[in-house]
C-alpha cells in the first residue's frame, strides 16, 4: 500500500457519513488518506449532495491534503481504491418498514437484522454487494472491503463465498461494549480485555478482565447492561445470566425474551411506529441540519440515530491493516477452526489480531455450552438464506425461515415468506425471473 | 453368556408386559430365556399381580421351560440377570398429567417426552435409574440394560455417563417406520434400508431404499406419513418436507408446527383431557381384561395403548446381542464421531450394527444441514438437564429450559420451572435437600 | 441388478484367474453370474489363451449356465458389466524386478508395494486404471470395480478422487488373518470378531474376540504370527508387541524391522533373486500346468504363488453387494470420519458393513496411539504420490519419497527417484511429455 | 502483579546467566525487577558463585535498584516469585555426552534434544521439573514458569499435564530466524511477519512477509539458510525445499538428511568429540573469564557457546506478560485446536499473541501437507516418552523409541534403550525402584 490512500464509500449519502469523515480527519497522521469518494445511486443523489457538501466543509476546516469527491458512477469511485466501505440500504428505509411490520402481522418478531426482517434484508442486499465485488475484482482487486451493511455477518459470509475480494464485517456493538465497560470501570478501553464469541448480532461476552483481574461476575447482576437505541430496554433475568456465565448482546433479547419483545413491538409500533419509522423522522431532521452551510463538523444529534461508533470501528480497522498494528479487534471473519461446531467458512464475530495480511481470529477460551445450539441454528439459517439470496431459490428461503428459532410454525414461515417476497418484488430480481 | 438366560423387567407391572412375554415366547429358539423376573415397587404391587398372573398363564400355554417370577425385591430380580429391561414410570401417570398440563398454563407445549414435561420426567427418572445401575454393578455387572424408560435418549446418556453398566436406549418409533414402509411398499421390512439420524424422538429418515432403489422422494408427498397414537395428526407442509429432503419423526411436529400443536393441545385437553388422562382410562380397561383368568395371550386392545412394537424392538435386540447377529438396528447409543457437531458422549438415535460386544453406530451418509441447529439445541438442553437431574441443580435446570427451542422466554422458563419443581417435590429429593 | 450378471476381469491372463473362476463356480447359487469376460492386452495374449482355456474347462466341468469369453477388446468386456475385477500388472514382472532391485542399490527396502517400489508401481498403474474407469463411466457406469491391483489402497483412492466409478479395494491379507485365527482357535471364521485399523499393507489388528471373549493378549506372545509368502519371516519382539497392544500386519516388518529386513533382502536377492524373480519362475511353472488339456480345476501349486484367498475375498464381496447381506468385511474404502487424524477422502483398510449401496466403514474402537504418526506419514506419502501419478509431477514425487519413513535422506530420495523414473520411462508417459 | 518483581532462576549457575542479567538490566524501564534469585544445587555451588558474582558486578555497574541473591535453597528463591526461569541440566554435561555418544554406537543420530538422546534428557529432566512445580504450587502459585530446559516442548507439555503452574516453553531458534531475516533483508525484526508451525526443534517457517510482501520464495534457493552452532552445516536440497514450500528448522536436518548427519556425527565425534565435549571446553573457558573481578558485563565469547538470544526471548516474554502488550511471539504452548491432527494438549511451537492472561496461539494459515506425518510421529513419541518419564515405565519408553522416525528397528530401540537406561541409572529413580 502506498502513502496516498483512496477510500470509496458505497452509500456515501448515508446520514452516517459525517462520522466517518470525522474519523478520517482525526486519524490522518496514521492513515494518510488523500481521496474520499462518496458514491450513491440516482435515487440517493439529493442526500449525497447534502451530506457530501457537509463532508467537504469538514475537510476544508481540517486543512488536510484530502479531497472529497461525490459521484453516481460506482466504477469511478472504486478504481484504484485501497479501502471500500459500504453503508448502503437496498430499498431504503421503506423496505425496512416492511421488514419490521410484516412479521408482526404473523405474530413474529419484526426486526431489521434479526428474524424474517433480517432475512429479507439479506435477500435484497447480497446480490447488490456481490455486484459491487465484481466491479472491485476488476478495478481494485487488492482493496479491503469494510462491510457495515446489515445483516453484516451474512453479507460478509456471502462475499467470502462468492468473491475473491477480501472483506471484513464490522459492527458498532463490540465498540459499544468497550465504551460501556470503560465508563463503568473508569479505565481506558485499551486496558480492558473482553472476549466475544458468537455471530454478528448474536454474540456473548465471556471474559472481561482489567489489568489481569476478572470483572465478569459483577456484570451479571447489573439490571440493565449495555444496550443500544434500536433495541428496547428489557431487564435481563439475573439468575439466568449468572447461570449462563456470559453477557449476552442486547440483540439476544429477541431470542431470550421473545414473548416480551414481541409484546413491546406490537405496543410501540402501534403507538409511535416501528424503529424504521422513527429513524426516518430522525434522518429527515439530520439532513435538515446537514444543509446548514455553516455546519462544518459532525452534529451532536447524530448520536441519537443509533449508529454511533461505526466510524471509530472503521477507522481503527483501516489503521491496523495499513500499519500492521497487530492489535486485537472484534470483527466478523471466517470461522476457520475457532468454533468446532460451525463450518470453517461460517462468518463469526470474534476477537482477531489485525495484521497487514488481514485479521487472524483468536481461539476462544470458552463457549457457554448452553448457547451452542442457538448459534448453530442461527448460522444454519444464515447459510441457507445466503444460498437462497444468491440463487433466488424460494425452497431454500423456506428451509431457512422454517428452521429459524423465532418462527413458531413452518406454515407461518410459508405464509410470511410469500407475503414478504411479494412485497419486496422490486428488489428481488433473482426470485422473480420468468 | 450361557444358554439359560435370566431376564429382569423393572416396572414389571406395566400394561406393556404381555407384549414382552409374547415376544420372548415367540423367539425362544434363538433366545433361550429360562427365567423372567417381573419386579415392581410396593405401590405397583396390585398391577404386578394382575399382569404377572397373565404372564404366567401365557408361558404355561406356550409349554416352554421358562419360569415367571413376581417380586418387589429388585436385588433378587437383578442377581445374575443377563438382560434387564426397564419400563417404569416414576410418579406414575399422575406425574405425567402434570407434565402435560402445567406447561399449557404457560402457553408452552405439554408433552411427556418433549419440552418441559420431558425435562420433568427426566429429573424424576434419572436418579432412580442410576440407583438401579448401582445395584446392577454389584449383582449383574455384565448384563445389558435395555432402556425403554422415557425420555429414553436422556436416560441412556445419563447411564453412560454415570455408570459402568452397558445400556442401550430403545424406542418403538423406528420399528414403526419400518412397519409403515413395509405396508406401504408391500415388501418385508428386512428388504428395506432406511437411514435414521438425530436423537430419540427427534430423528429424521434420510434414506429409504428397497432393493437398491431410492423411495424417499415419493414419501415427501404423502400428506400423512407415519404417526403414532400419542402424537396428534397434523398434516405436514409438503413443500417444506421436499425442501428438507428427509422424513421427520412425528415428534418433530412439536417443533415444526409448534403453534398448531399447541392449539390442538389446548383444545383437546379441555375436551377429552391430556394424553395421560386418556391413557389412564385405557390402562384401567386393560387391567380389567388382564384379570380374566381365561386370558392366556396378549389382548388385541393393547395395540390402542400406543406402545406397540416395544416388545419386538426389545426381543430383536436381545437376540442380536446374544447371537452376535451383526444386523442393523436403529438404537440410542453414544455418538462417538457419528455426528460431527455433537460431543462424543451425546446419546443419539442412529443405525447400528449389533455385535456380541454391543451396537456399533454406522456413519450417516447425510444430515440435512437445516436441522443441525435444532439437534444441537435439543441435545444441549438434554445434557444440561441430565446434569441438573444428577446434581439436583436448579440453575442448570433453568439453563436447560431457558435454552429449549419450545420456550418463548427465559422468564416463562423461570416461572414454569418453579411451579413444576414444586409440584414434583415428592419425586425430586435431590432438588429439595435442606 | 438383474439376475444374470456379467463380470469383466481386467488382466484376465493372470495366473490367479483359476482361483476366481473356482470361486464363481462354488458360489453360483447366491451370485448368478452368466458371463465372465477375461480381457488382457496384446502382450498378454498368449497367457490369456492358456488360462482362459483352463477357465473354460473348469466351467464346462461345473455344468453351470455360464459363458467364459476371452478378448483383447476392453470396451467389449466392460459393456454392461455388473462387476469389474482388476488384477493386472503394468510393466509385468520385469517392472517389479526393478521396483525391488533399484532401491536396494541405495540401501533402501525394495518391495512391490511398500516404499519406493510401491511408489513406482503406483505411478505406472494409476493412469491406466483411470483410463479403464473412463471406459466404465461410459459402458457400465453403475458397475462395481473390485480393485486388487497393488498398491491397492493408493489405486483405490485415486479412483475415488478422479472417477465417478464406485470402487472398493481388496486385499487377501485380512482374509488370511481370519484363516490363521480360525486354525489357531479351531473355530469357524464367522465366529471370530477381529477389528482392523490402518491402511492397505499397513494395518494392525486391535481386537480379536471369539464368542465375546478377547483372545488378543495371547496372540502377542506367539513368536511367528501370521505371515505370507512374499514377506520374509522375521520374529517379532514380543515385549514390543505387547506394549503396542495390537497385532501388526506382516508388511509392518518393513517399518518396525527395517534394518533386519533390508539385510535379509540384500542377502536373499544376491542368493536366489528378489521375490519378483522367484514369482516369475513360479508363474512359468504354473502356466506349464495350465496348458494341460486334461486339467479342469485350480491346481494345488497355485497356493505357493502367494495370492491365495484373493478369489475368496472377491466373491464374498460380490455376494454381499448383490444380496444386501450387511455382513462385516475388511475393505479399502474412504475414511470419512473413521480415523480423526486422516482426511475424509483417504483410503483406509477397515471393517465395513457391506450393503447393497456399498460398504459402510465401522467406527474403530481404538487406534494404538503410537502408530498414528506412521499411518499419517504413509498416507501423506500416498496422497502426494497419487497426485504425482495423475499429473506426472516430479516435484510431488520427490516430496512423496522424501517424506517416506523408509527413506534415510532427501538426497537419497532424489537420486533414487531419478533412476527409477528413467528405468520406468516407457510406462510413465505423463512424466516424460515434452 | 506488582511493580516490584522477583525473578527466580533455576540453574542460576549456568554460563547463560550473564545474558539474562544483561536483558533484565536493559529492559528495566518496562519490567521493574527488584530481586533476582539465582539458585543451584550443591554440585553447582562453585559455578553459581563465579557467575553470581559477575551478575552482582553487572547490576552494580547499572546503578539500578535491583538485588541479586545466590542460594542453594530452592524454596527460598521461589517464595513469592513473579517469574521463574529454568536453565538447568540434570546430569550436567556428562549426561549429555552419553546422550550423544551411545546412540552413535547403534548407528543412530546422537543429539541432545532430538532422537534417543533427547528422550533420555526428557526422562532425566521431567521428574525434576515437576518437583520444582510442586514447590511453586505452594510458594508462588500464580508465577509464570519460563521454561528453557530442553527438550523444551516435552518438558513444557509434561508440566501442562501434571501441574497447575502456568508455563511457557521458549527456544532461541525462532528469535534467531528473525535476526537472520532482519540482516538478510535489512529491515528491523518488528517489520517482519514470519509464521512458524510445528514442534520445538521441529518447526517450519511457512510465511515470511515484509510490509505485506511475501519473501518466502527467494529463501528456498539460499544454499545455507539459518543455522546454529550446535547443528552442523549441511546444504539443503533446493528442489526439495522449493517443493516443500517452507523453510525447515536446522534441527530438521536430522530427519531430512539422516544419513549425512549420521556420517558427520561419526566423523566429528571421532575427531573433535561430540558437541557436549566441545561445549564443556567452551564452558571451562567462559568460567575462567567470569572469574575476572574486573569484568562487569557479558563477555563476547558467550556468543560462541550457542545459546545466544535466550535472554532476549525470555525478557521479551516477561515484558509482554507483565504489560499486556498483545504482541506476537513464537512460543511453545498447548495446541488447542491449532493443528487438527494433534491432540488439544500437545505442546506445539507456534505464533502467539501474548496477553496478560498468557499466550493465545494464532491459527496457522497453512501446514505443508507432506510434514503432517512427521509432526504427528514425533509428537506421539514425545507423548509416550512424557508418560514413560512420569511413571518410570520401560514399556512405554520402548513404544516411544520404537516408533521414533530416526530408529531403524524395534530391536535396535530395545538394545539402545537398555544401555541408555543403565547408564543414566543415577538420574532415573522412577525406572529403578525395587
Image: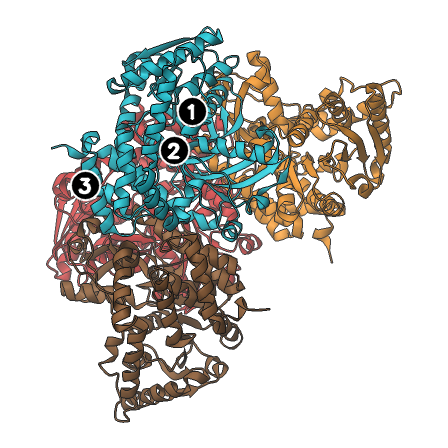
Chain colours: A orange, B red, C brown, D cyan
What's the distance in space between the residues labelled 2 and 1, CA to CA?
59 Å
User: Split into 4 quadrants, where in the image is the C terminus of chain B?
Assistant: top left
Q: Which residue is mark 3?
A: B46
- Residue D36 seen: no
Label 3 or label 2, whichever lies nearer to me, is 2
Residue B271 against residue C145 in the figure, above or below: above
Judging from the image, what secondary structure is the residue with disc 3 in?
helix
Q: Answer yes or no: are tags 3 and 2 on the same subunit.
A: yes
Q: Residue at x 29, y 87 (%)?
A: C288
List the residue tagged with mark 1: D302
Q: Quadrant of residue B183?
A: bottom left
Q: How many marks?
A: 3
Of marks 1 and 3, the one in the foreground: 1
User: In the drawing, what numbered circle is on residue A191?
Assistant: none
Q: Is residue B95 above or below residue C284?
A: above
Q: Position of residue C108 (x, y in %)?
A: 35, 59
Amino acid at each position: 500500500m502506498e502513502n496516498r490512500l483512496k477510500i470509496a464509500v458505497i452509500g456515501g449519502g448515508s446520514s452516517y457519513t459525517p462520522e466517518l469523515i470525522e474519523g478520517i480527519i482525526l486519524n490522518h497522521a496514521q492513515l494518510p488518506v488523500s481521496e474520499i469518494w462518496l458514491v450513491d445511486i440516482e435515487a440517493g443523489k439529493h442526500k449525497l449532495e447534502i451530506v457530501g457538501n457537509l463532508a467537504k466543509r469538514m475537510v476544508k476546516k481540517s486543512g488536510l491534503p484530502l479531497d472529497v469527491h461525490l459521484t453516481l458512477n460506482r466504477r469511478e469511485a472504486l478504481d484504484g481504491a485501497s479501502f471500500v466501505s459500504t453503508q448502503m440500504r437496498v430499498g431504503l428505509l421503506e423496505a425496512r418498514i416492511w421488514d419490521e411490520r410484516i412479521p408482526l402481522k404473523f405474530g413474529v418478531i419484526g426486526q431489521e437484522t434479526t428474524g424474517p426482517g433480517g432475512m429479507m434484508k439479506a435477500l435484497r442486499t447480497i446480490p447488490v454487494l456481490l455486484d459491487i465485488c465484481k466491479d472491485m475484482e476488476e478495478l481494485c482487486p487488492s482493496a479491503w472491503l469494510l462491510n457495515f451493511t446489515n445483516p453484516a455477518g451474512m453479507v460478509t459470509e456471502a462475499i467470502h463465498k462468492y468473491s475473491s475480494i477480501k472483506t471484513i464485517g464490522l459492527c458498532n456493538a463490540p465498540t459499544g461494549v468497550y465504551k460501556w465497560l470503560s465508563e463503568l470501570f473508569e479505565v481506558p478501553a485499551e486496558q480492558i480485555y473482553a472476549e466475544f464469541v458468537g455471530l454478528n448480532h448474536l454474540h456473548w461476552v465471556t471474559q472481561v478482565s482489567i489489568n489481569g483481574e476478572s470483572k465478569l461476575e459483577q456484570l451479571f447482576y447489573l439490571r440493565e447492561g449495555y444496550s443500544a437505541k434500536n433495541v428496547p430496554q428489557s431487564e435481563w433475568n439475573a439468575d439466568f445470566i449468572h447461570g449462563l456465565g456470559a453477557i449476552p448482546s442486547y440483540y439476544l433479547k429477541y431470542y431470550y425474551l421473545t414473548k416480551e419483545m414481541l409484546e413491546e413491538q406490537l405496543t410501540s409500533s402501534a403507538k409511535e411506529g416501528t424503529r424504521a419509522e422513527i429513524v426516518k423522522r430522525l434522518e429527515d431532521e439530520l439532513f435538515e441540519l446537514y444543509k446548514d452551510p455553516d455546519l462544518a463538523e459532525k452534529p451532536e444529534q447524530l448520536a441519537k440515530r443509533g449508529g454511533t461508533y461505526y466510524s471509530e470501528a472503521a477507522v481503527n480497522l483501516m489503521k491496523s491493516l495499513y500499519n500492521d498494528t497487530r492489535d486485537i479487534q472484534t470483527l466478523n471473519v471466517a470461522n476457520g477452526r475457532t468454533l468446532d461446531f460451525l463450518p470453517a467458512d461460517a462468518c463469526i464475530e470474534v476477537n482477531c489480531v489485525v495484521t497487514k495480511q488481514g485479521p487472524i481470529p483468536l481461539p476462544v477460551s470458552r463457549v457457554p455450552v448452553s448457547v451452542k445450539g442457538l448459534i448453530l441454528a442461527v448460522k444454519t439459517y444464515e447459510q441457507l438464506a445466503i444460498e437462497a439470496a444468491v440463487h433466488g431459490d424460494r425452497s431454500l428461503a423456506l428451509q431457512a425461515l422454517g428452521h429459524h428459532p423465532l418462527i413458531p410454525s413452518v406454515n407461518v414461515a410459508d405464509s410470511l415468506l410469500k407475503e414478504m417476497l411479494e412485497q419486496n418484488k422490486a428488489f428481488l430480481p433473482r426470485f422473480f425471473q420468468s
